[in-house]
Amino acid sequence: MVPHLITALTGPINELEQRILDSMPAIERWFRLEWMEHTPPFYSSVDIRNAGFKLAPVDTNLYPGGWNNLTPEMLPLAVQAAMAAIEKICPEARNLLLIPENHTRNTFYLSNVAQLRRIFHMAGLNVRIGSISPEIKKNTVIEIPGGETVTLEPVIRSKTRLGLKDFDPCTILLNNDLSAGIPGILEDIHEQYLLPPLHAGWSVRRKSKHFQSYEEVSKRFGKLLGIDPWLINPMFNRCGEVNFAESAGNECLSSNVDALLTKIRRKYKEYGIKEKPFVVVKADNGTYGMGIMTVRDPKELEDLNRRTRNKMSVIKDGQTVSEVIIQEGVLTNERMHDAVAEPVVYMMDRYVVGGFYRVHAERGIDENLNAPGASFVPLAFDQSTHLPQPGAKPGASAPNRFYMYGVIGRLAMLAASYELEATNPEAEVYE
């Protein structure tokens, strides 16, 4: 299943695809050199939007859920990447403790945990699932779709180590994005490998920092390919002092939205694009598609109704929104069964291991698709195993489209590694 691009403007994307394929040896060498200098995040997923005239990441998650949406054909790639990642960090690893999110009863989320357990088990590790939720006081078995079960065990903290009753892991994998802050039980662990590091959590991370790093990456990559970096980079602004509940910070929001829309209009004019520009305002930290709205005109901000204000003021784990990123909106011109679709690319270590399309029948081409009612259709990586097919006509080959998505996904992952280096509290500073 490959969504068709419904747009008369596939020209620039087909051109970009051709440019990326023609430059494949240079691109792979460029990534190879980058990974010699920078450490990729342990795992990540990237939401990508393909407008036909522009292809850009709109969100990068460093604690990706949704692994259960990968097809069985993709698992060997994930297992190989997991082996490579573990080998680099702790070659003698035997036990892995997987710490999930605290909302323990969501069986779809737990299917993702089961899939991660399967991947690391096949990579040669004993895997157990430890919960840091105060509700889990004894071993709790939960049935998940497909007849499997997941056993959540309460995590035990000794003075310097984290483990379970009679289980001492050398590696701890967090699948909990720490939206509510860093719990004390995870602090000051120096004898075990904690992946990803704590500063990758939303208590420290900011989307605006990520896209600042991505802008740097896209400029360098644009130079390599001889393209305008705007074709792969969503422009953005940020506001640091907003309060939606009390309508505070509206001037900052309004003027930044206006400035960004003006910049987008200029670009659309340059490329002869007839679409109406829009921006997406979202919480600068946090995930789960919460705290997001589409704005097409600054006037819309003047009379936000109570429902929108409430929706924007609080995100996951009841965190209040005070900082927002205003991001250039990228249309999605991909359709699956007449529903709007966007690709999500999954990576482990520096490798693309698979992905899926997020499809939403009730959303428009300029709206957030990460919302209740979304469904998931696996990317057709199973036939292609991402190997591109040089010589195929641009826009006609599924493997080539997925290779292109994989390149954009890896650029976002590289930006995340720059970002993590910049926010590392233990980084050595050379004056």
Image (cartoon, rainbow, N blue to C red):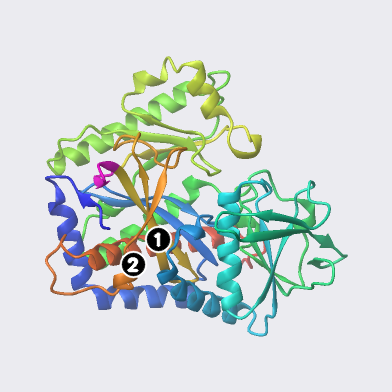
Q: Label 1, label 2: how many angstroms apart (C-alpha)? A: 8 Å
Q: Is residue 17 above or below residue 306?
A: below
What amino acid is found at the position of numbered circle 1 in the picture? Answer: Gly
Q: Is residue 186 visible?
A: yes
Mark 1 or mark 2: whose residue is earlier in sequence: 1
Judging by the rendered image, the residue that carries numbered circle 2 is 381
Q: Does the residue at mark 1 contact the one at mark 2 (Cβ under 8 Å)?
A: yes
Work out whether residue 392 or residue 260 is closer to the camera in this orientation and state it: 392
Towards the viewer: 211 or 191? 191
- Residue 331 in view of the camera: no
Quarter of the image with the N terminus in it: bottom left
* Residue sitting farthest toward the bottom: 92
Quickly name the residue at label 1: 355
Is 335 within the magenta? yes
Which stretch appears magenta?
A: 332-339
Residue 174, image x, y percentages:
64, 60
Above or below for 99 versus 237: below
Q: Position of residue 286 (x, y in %)?
A: 56, 43
